[in-house]
Image (cartoon, rainbow, N blue to C red):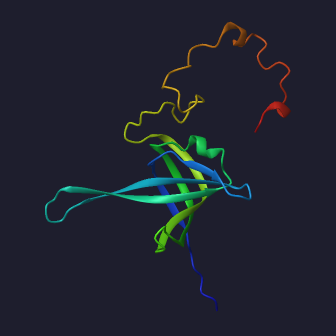
């Protein structure tokens, strides 16, 4: 009977930097970012609370559109698998690196640590726009009129 194995990672944390997307020669997008997760415990000897932050490097394939929303401080849910690979550095020394290859990335609410970027989980404003900017009433030419919804069918709804 064959032995089963499991390689599954679930992270819920905050992005440590803006995601970076590059394209490999075949044209596939590779997005990389880091996620910080915290662990908190009470020290037995001193009775003081201690905290430790772990950083995980994440690789996401073929999701270049998501990278625009993966900005420093955003909270994310990442599900995937661990992968260790090796390469030679500039001195010819073999280097091993372990990263999470993401199958699923979900943006969660808010920003960690009082991030300075604008927008929130419900906003449709670009992330780089200051919080509250562009939220004034639309011009009169774009105001809804009494015929709201007229001529719109189920085929016009994108979901």
Please determine whether, in this image, residue 71 is positioned above or below residue 46.
above
Q: Residue 134 versus residue 11: which sits nearer the camera?
A: 134
| Residue under the point 73% across and 54% down | 27
Q: How many numbered marks does the figure carry?
A: 0
* Residue 122 place in picture, x, y as percent: 56, 33
Location of the C terminus by quadrant is top right
Please determine whether, in this image, residue 86 is positioned above or below residue 128.
below
- Occupied quadrant, residue 45: bottom left
| Residue under the point 83% across and 18% down | 150
Residue found at the far front of this picture: 91
Q: Residue 29 versus residue 70: which sits nearer the camera?
A: 29
| Residue under the point 48% across and 67% down | 90
Left or right of 65 in this view: 118: left
* Residue 140 place in picture, x, y as percent: 68, 7
* Residue 46 place in picture, x, y as percent: 13, 61
- Occupied quadrant, residue 1: bottom right
* Residue 91 place in picture, x, y as percent: 46, 70
């Amino acid at each position: 009977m064959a032995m089963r194995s499991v390689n599954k990672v679930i992270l819920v944390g905050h992005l440590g930097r803006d995601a970076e997307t590059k394209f490999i020669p075949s044209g596939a997008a590779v997005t990389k970012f880091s996620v910080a997760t915290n662990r908190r415990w009470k020290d037995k000897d001193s009775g003081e609370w201690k905290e430790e932050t772990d950083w995980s490097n994440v690789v996401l394939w073929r999701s270049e559109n998501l990278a625009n929303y993966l900005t420093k401080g955003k909270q994310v849910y990442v599900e995937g698998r661990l992968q260790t690979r090796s390469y030679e550095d500039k001195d010819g020394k073999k280097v091993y690196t372990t990263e999470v290859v993401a199958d699923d990335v979900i943006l969660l609410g808010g920003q960690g640590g009082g991030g300075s970027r604008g927008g929130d989980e419900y906003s449709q404003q670009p992330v780089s726009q200051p919080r509250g900017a562009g939220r004034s009433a639309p011009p009169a030419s774009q105001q809804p009129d009494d015929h709201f919804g007229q001529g719109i069918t189920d085929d016009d709804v994108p979901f």
